[in-house]
Image: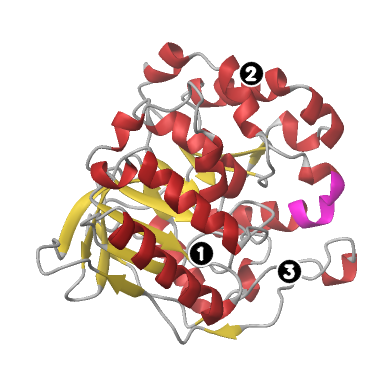
Amino acid sequence: MTTSKWVPPKIATIAPSWGGPSVFPHIYRLGVEFLSEFFETTVVELESTRKDARFLREHPEYRAKELEEALTAEEFDYIISAIGGEESIRILKYLNKEKLRQVKHKPIFMGFSDVTSIHIFLNQLGYLTYYGPSVMAGFAQAKQLGKEFLEHLTKVFKEKLDTISYSPYPFYVEGYPDWADVSKAGQINPRIKNTAKWVFLTQSNNTKTKVEGVIFGGSWEIFDQFRGTKHIEYSYLKDKILLLEPSEEVSKTWLRVSLIALGEIGIYNNIKALIIGRARGGEETLHFLEDAVKQIVYSDYKADIPIVLNFDSGHTDPQLIVPLGGDKVVIDFDKKSIVWQREIIR
């Protein structure tokens, strides 16, 4: 553990994807209020968080300009996405790679779901990013998500720990009550006991049971969206740990098809390990995924990689914050442990 005193960080919120703050301002406001209280600071709300959702959809170049300015200002420690969406990949062609690469004080971008596009883009430029809650989905509901979640946030952001040992949360929730109902703002759907925990799989006795590496990835669908584009160099995945988490809308057929596609483009031959985040649908979906992985990854593609299923990341809450593109993580399949080794501590 480091001994430096915690200083409130400089935080900005941004809407690089869907303009959710303009549609559900009461949800967005709750998230900002939590961030201000937790970090003991005034949150800088960038202009996009006040823009109409239609305007943002029609102007990807505007979103890109604002993001680039925030990243290169060397003013912020964290830039937190308001919410996800479906097409933040459209802003990438407007970003100046070389300008972003040369930034000395690289802020940590944070969010999940559609902004996986931004994680993928920045990781390849040398940025450490955090895959975790967004302002409206996760932070707005933080006070309802249990003491374990608040303790995890404290470890990540306030305690200056050199290592963080992950643990499964005792429960999870699948979404929130209708955001259009202002009276239910900040509430969560019923808690589901986390009986399955994490599932650790290995192919054979020759499979490495302890791996160390940098995590890359995020939303499964958005990672898949990058296939055939110029925005990803698959060689970057060499010796990485790939994180994929399915959204609330993905079908079982799509999951199998995507696992096959990943095999066809050679992903399993390059990565050290695969982490699959918890899918909605409970243990039925988990068992489906376990069977699909064993058949497709292990049997069909003969991939000798260790795999973790049901990790607390993505489209269920509470989420574990995952470092992408920078700090290393150690997964011990014998001890069934996952430890974040931190190099960059803000």
| Residue at the image position 30 percent from the left and 47 percent from the top | 268
User: Majority secondary structure of the magenta segment?
Assistant: helix
**Amino acid, disc 2:** Lys
Task: Give residue 256's position: percent from left, percent from top.
Answer: 50, 58
| Residue at the image position 37 percent from the left and 75 percent from the top | 198
Q: Residues within 10 Å of mark 2 (few under 14, many from 20)?
A: some
Residue highlighted by disc 3: 176
Q: Residues within 10 Å of mark 3 (few under 14, many from 20)?
A: some
Task: Give residue 183's position: percent from left, percent from top.
Answer: 88, 71
Q: Is residue 126 left or right of residue 31?
A: left
Tell me how far mark 3 sits from mark 1, CA to CA.
Answer: 14 Å
**Amino acid, disc 1:** Gln
Q: Picture quarter containing residue 3?
A: bottom left
Residue 195 vertical placement versus 173 (above, below) = below
Residue highlighted by disc 2: 65
Task: Give residue 64's position: percent from left, percent from top.
Answer: 63, 22
Q: Secondary structure at mark 2?
A: helix
Magenta part of the protein: which range? 23-28
Q: Earlier in the sequence, mark 2 or mark 1?
A: 2
**Amino acid, disc 3:** Tyr
Residue highlighted by disc 1: 319
